[in-house]
Amino acid sequence: SVAQALKVGCTVEPEHFENVTLYFSDIVGFTTISANSEPIEVVDLLNDLYTLFDAIIGNHDVYKVETIGDAYMVASGLPVPNGNRHAAEITNMALDILSAVGTFKMRHMPEVPVRIRIGLHSGPCVAGVVGLTMPRYCLFGDTVNTASRMEATGMPYRIHVSCSTVKILQDLNMGYKVQLRGKTEMKGKAVEETYWLIGKTGFTKPLPVPPELKSGPEMTKDFKLMLQKAVRKISTVRQVAQLTMVDEGNVMMHHH
């Protein structure tokens, strides 16, 4: 395995994979959440969320590539190829993750929903280990950029799927339900038809209801209002807590 080779100090040759499916997700409004939270609260949020994700990916034939801040990247079809099952593995995992996120609560702002955006894309890629002191298994190629772009052009509580993944899902004929989103502009690329994955026959877990497909600014406004309310609530709680501490401090002083 890659890990064994690394332990022995061997270099691992980069490997080309004909077809894999990639998953990207991130938290919509994460910057706003962070700006209104203590650093430790952000750490707790990401730890709680990734613990949840990690438990889910264990049920699928997938490989967690990395997490950067609030972004989470998973692949299937590598390091061990699995025919064209990779599209189904990632799609099933994405449905499971979306379902779990629907009921996920932040410890410090339980009333603010954590809305993630998910992007899926299939294609060829090269995987190799990069770095000596902190070796990491990294993926390279246009497929990675397109998958990341699918996520970036997605919407909260939605799974945005490229044409290449949809084709494989249709070939697999396992009852995946998709809805045409229309033409999406891929960065520095032609415009492509993309899809929303809305479910699967036999998938009965509840999925969170995505916000209506309105314009970005409108949505951001709604989210900011919700956050402001939560933050006001928290700061009130904090003020009360500080007052209580001041009182206790005074009591302590009187004892002397």
Image: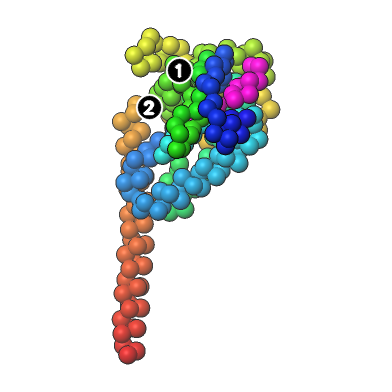
The disc labelled 1 sits on which kind of residue?
Answer: Gly
Q: Answer above or below: position of 182 versus 51.
A: above
Instruction: Answer few, some or many: residues within 10 Å of disc 2's Cα (few below 14, many 20 plus, some between 14 and 19).
Output: few
**Residue 199 visible in the picture:** no
Residue 214's label in the rendered image is: 2
Query: Going 44% across and 32% down the picture, which residue do you hit?
Result: 131
Query: Going 40% across and 53% down the picture, which residue do you hit?
Result: 40
Q: Is residue 25 magenta?
A: no
Q: Position of residue 127 (x, y in %)?
A: 51, 22
The disc labelled 2 sits on which kind of residue?
Answer: Lys
Q: Answer above or below: position of 222 versus 145.
A: below
Question: Does dot 1 land on a helix, a strand or a loop?
Answer: loop
Q: Position of residue 133 (x, y in %)?
A: 45, 38
- Is 47 displayed left or right of 214 in the figure? right
Q: CA distance from mark 1 to mark 2?
A: 32 Å
Q: Where the C terminus falls, by quadrant?
A: bottom left
Query: Which residue in the rendered view is the most extreme toward the bottom?
Result: 256
Residue 141's label in the rendered image is: 1
Q: Position of residue 5 (x, y in %)?
A: 59, 31
Q: Is residue 80 magenta?
A: yes
**Residue 60 visible in the picture:** yes
Viewer-proximal residue among 201 and 55: 55
Query: Going 46% across and 29% down the picture, which residue do you hit?
Result: 130
Q: Position of residue 165 (x, y in %)?
A: 55, 16
Residue 107's label in the rendered image is: none
Query: Going 46% across and 45% down the picture, which residue do you hit?
Result: 46
Magenta span of residues: 72-86
